[in-house]
Image (cartoon, coloured by chain):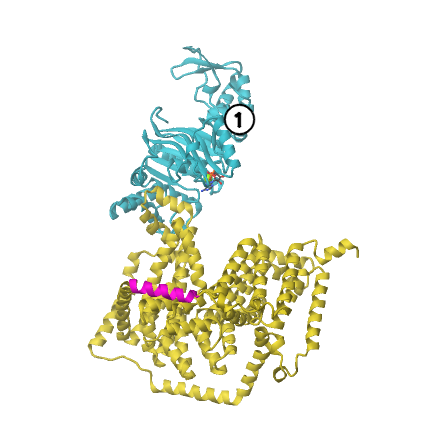
Amino acid sequence: MADSGDITLACAQLWKVFGEGDLAGGLGASGAEAAALADSLRAEGHIVGCCDIDIEIKRGEFFVLMGLSGSGKSTLLRCLSRLTEPTAGRLTLDGEDFLNAGPKALMDIRRRKMGMVFQHFGLFPHMTVLDNVAFPLKVQGVGNGERENRARQMVSLVGLEGREAAYPHQLSGGQKQRVGIARSLAVDPEIWFLDEPFSALDPLIRWQMQSELLRLQNLFHKTVVFVTHDFIEAVRLADRIAIMKDGRVVQIGTPEDIVLNPADAYVSEFVKEAPRTKIIKVSQLMEPVEGDDAAEQGLDPGMTLEDALTWSAERGGTLSVTDTAGRTIGRIVPERLSAALSGARLD
Amino acid sequence: MTSAELTRRIGFATAPPAALAWLCVLIFAGVVTFAKTSLPWLQIYPASGVIPLADWVNAAIDALVSVVEPVTRGIALLLEWPMLGLRDLLQWTPWPIALLAVALLAFHAAGLRLALLCGVALVYIALAGFWHQAMNTMALVGIAVPLSLTIGLAAGIWAQRTKIGAGIVPPTLDMMQTMPTFAYLIPLLVLFGFGPVVGLIASAIYACPPMVRNVRLGLTRVPSEIAEAARISGSSRYQQLFWVELPAAMAQIKVGINQTIMAALSMVIIASVIGGFDDIGWEVLSTMRKARFGESLLSGAVIVILAVVMDRISAAYAGRGRAQVGTTAKSWQLSPWTWATAGLVAFCLLLKALGLDLAIDGPAWAHEFAAWINTQLDGFVASSGQLLTDLKNAAFYYYLLPIRIGFSQAILPFTWGFTFTAEMQWGYWIALVLLTGLLILRGRWRSGGALMVAGYLLFFGLTALPWAVFFAWALLLAWQLGGCRLLLFVGGALAFILVTGMWERAMLSLYLCGAAVAMSFVLGASLGVWAAASGRVSAVLRPIADTFQTIPLFVFLIPVLMFFQVGEFTALLAIIAYAFVPALRYTENGLRQVSPQLIEVAVEQGCTKSQIFWQVKLPLAMPAILVGLNQTILYGFAMLVIAALVGTTGLGQQIFLALGAADTGLGLTAGLSMALLAMIADRMLQAIARQRFEGMQ
Ligand SMILES: Nc1ncnc2c1ncn2[C@@H]1O[C@H](COP(=O)(O)OP(=O)(O)O)[C@@H](O)[C@H]1O
Ligand SMILES: [Mg+2]
């Protein structure tokens, strides 16, 4: 879980406008003003990829960018890694101005701190699996023997032992993406960018790969920036989600926050398809009360709505919530449980 | 018929401005024709209006040469050194060793069949007694190709990576590919001095456009994610380009390498007109000049062999699957090939050390064979000379001459058997006007206009046409097809030809090229239709077409010259033999690629076979066929210059004369005029394609 306060990557008032012309001077606007500016830029024929983005990503956090296709997720991700130069705004990495880094410094930061996984795998067609995985090490100038050892280690980490000598075109989609993941982790980066890594895969494989990813994240605790258009995927993986629309971030929050309190109709659309009962937690539904020792065991605050429902079905009446020390910390009326289930707003 | 229907039918409602413009231009043509005496400067461009551009260019070049001569001579020396070194090495290498090496390479590239083919082909070269000349040619190619590939790679990367490069490179390539081959040689001759190095430099320059194009295309097609994966790994620009992007684009680049090799060989052969290197092109040329066609044929076959061997081997490497592309250097080092090569070199050294002379000069019977061909040929020409002459005359009097000087002058009693009397001429015009009127009444004003123009053209002839009329037609057509931009381009290009005094020559070139292209296209397209309809025909025609495309243009002159001597008819045949291939290929491919679903729909609706062909297949294949026509025209122009060797008048002849006199100014203006004619045709066809087939493909 995120270690709050320790910010790795942050951007403020970040803009990316594609197309001709020098706009950097005129993009200071924020808030509603920014939305109006973006509209007028679009009317002039510019393509606004990102518009006034403020995001702070904490160390070890799994941060997901979610939105419909064309909403600017990839553009934002590429701005954060400076694969694309932002048109305006500030970008800080470990507290230092990242936009100020010159070409050499940028190269160095990428070699040591960044790894990236691509939607269509981005594997080098002329290299074997092993050479692909070893590539970032080769770029760093790591010697032959050490490079091969490390690459073999990574290949077995993603479960591809025995396929080291295969070429990308000889692998299935899932296997290709395992290679992509191994390559992106080869230099043990601090920040791990993933741009829709599983969107090109079949649903079943996608589910497996998500589990695999969670396993790796539990192992390494990277700072992750993950892009997806699949809300269920976002909810399953994220510590926090930023929901994007037309280049703007419309809501940032934990999956539970978003499911319970969608900021607008656009977000509600996504939330509809989410398995609410598996996401919403008891702690978000209860009315807090002064802690006193409970007469009997109540609901656990980390319990999901689904579990709470099963539990309450056996009891009835107002339910109490108890912490690990056995003290009552809150109360839930069953109507509130069913309201949460039906998708009504809860404030 | 209501009056509204009438106007609709006449077509005024659909396209009045263009139709009216054509009417005006036709009236203008009539006025110019009838006002012959009062407006003579509209007939023939006055000499006083000619700008002496050629002289200016020469003066500029002379000034330039005096400054840069030390540098260019230095470069020439620098290139001469490895070229002579390679030549000596190739000459020194015993021919069986070279043969084995090539066979080994062919085997590595594509297996036993190609190895055998190459082996047999090289044995022929040795036995026919042209080993020496062939190796000289290979020495030129061997230096020109790496040079060309390097230039091409650099220019391709530059064009793909930088804005300036992307702005400069593509139009330069367009220009280079339409510029006649001989025209390259002249400024190089002046700059670098007479000698084989000029051929080398010309080949290196001439052959690089395909490499540039393919490098650029390959790099552009590298998926952005692959480039990003390299960047996010922290690659430097150098690492990104040379470790990732170029290898990932290799399949495309190999296609470029193959094409560059073939272009270099072609230009080396053409450049042999400079002489002085005793290469195989020179052998063909000199025997052809002496009318010793036996030797020409045998040495021409050597050129074909060199071309085919080089093409097949490099194409085999280019066409390999990805799995093999990735073979690492390590496995190559350990492979038997290394050992085989090393063994071969050792064996060769041993033989030489033992003092064995393996040089081959061609046995006596090879010369006898050539002599025998000569006698047979003489015999054949003597026995069927009348037939050949009749054929030649018929094509000349009934096809070429009317296009050139028009019916009004071509129809004479001793050729056509009657006089084109005033009554007949009136009849011709009345019939023409009636037919045009009929077409317009049926709403087909485009066809009507085209018929009128064609009738006018055939009456007066292309070379006797007043320049102002031609100019006006071309401008109007350009405007109609491509708007103001095309109009400006065509206007500028024709004005250049006019004011440099090249107009008459240009019309002579245009007439011959037009006549040849028309026949090439009809022949090629018909064969293409046939091949698309029958798999067996296709199986026969395909390898022939492939081989024809790899043969350096020069060789096409031999057989036609053998039978028809020097003249325009010979040039016509040579152009047709070379230029029908793209028409065939594109027509066949276009027809074959029509989606089977669409044909099924047509069958479903009960179309007959001929309906399916005319209503479904042909229209759908039209964009591809149009590209074929475009290519045919460019091929026609390319061959037209070479055909100057067998006696044509026009721009080609001028360029050839300029080559002999090292007259850069004349060579460049004539060459540029020809390039501009080709570009006008190219742009107009592209405009048609855009206008007609937008969105179809
Ligand atoms: N290189 C580019 N040039 C111009 N427009 C671009 C470029 N990259 C992305 N865009 C545009 O920016 C918008 C956001 O794209 P993107 O970030 O790829 O969306 P997402 O990843 O959310 O599907 C789209 O309208 C897209 O067309
Ligand atoms: Mg995207």
Across the whole image, how many numbered discs are drawn on residues? 1
**Chain B image colour:** yellow
Quadrant location of the N terminus of chain A?
top left
Colour cyan maps to chain: A
**How far from the left and from the top, in percent, is residue A76?**
43, 35
Instruction: Identify which amino acid the numbered label 1 is placed on.
Output: Asp
The reply to whether residue B584 is in sight is yes
Q: State which quadrant residue A77 falls in.
A: top left
Is B518 left, or right, of A104 in this rendering?
Answer: right
Residue drawn where x is 34% and y is 38% of the image:
A114
**How far from the left and from the top, in percent, is residue B672?**
45, 64
Residue drawn where x is 63% and y is 72% of the image:
B459
The chain that hosts pointer 1 is A
**How far from the left and from the top, in percent, is residue B238?**
31, 49
Q: In this view of the protein, which residue sits in the foreground, B197 or B19?
A: B19
Q: Say above or below: B127 vs A22.
A: below
Residue segment shown in magenta: B52-67
Q: In this view of the protein, which residue sits in the foreground, A338 or B360?
A: B360
Q: Say above or below: B151 vs B185.
A: above
Magenta-highlighted stretch: main secondary structure? helix
Q: Residue furthest right?
A: B1
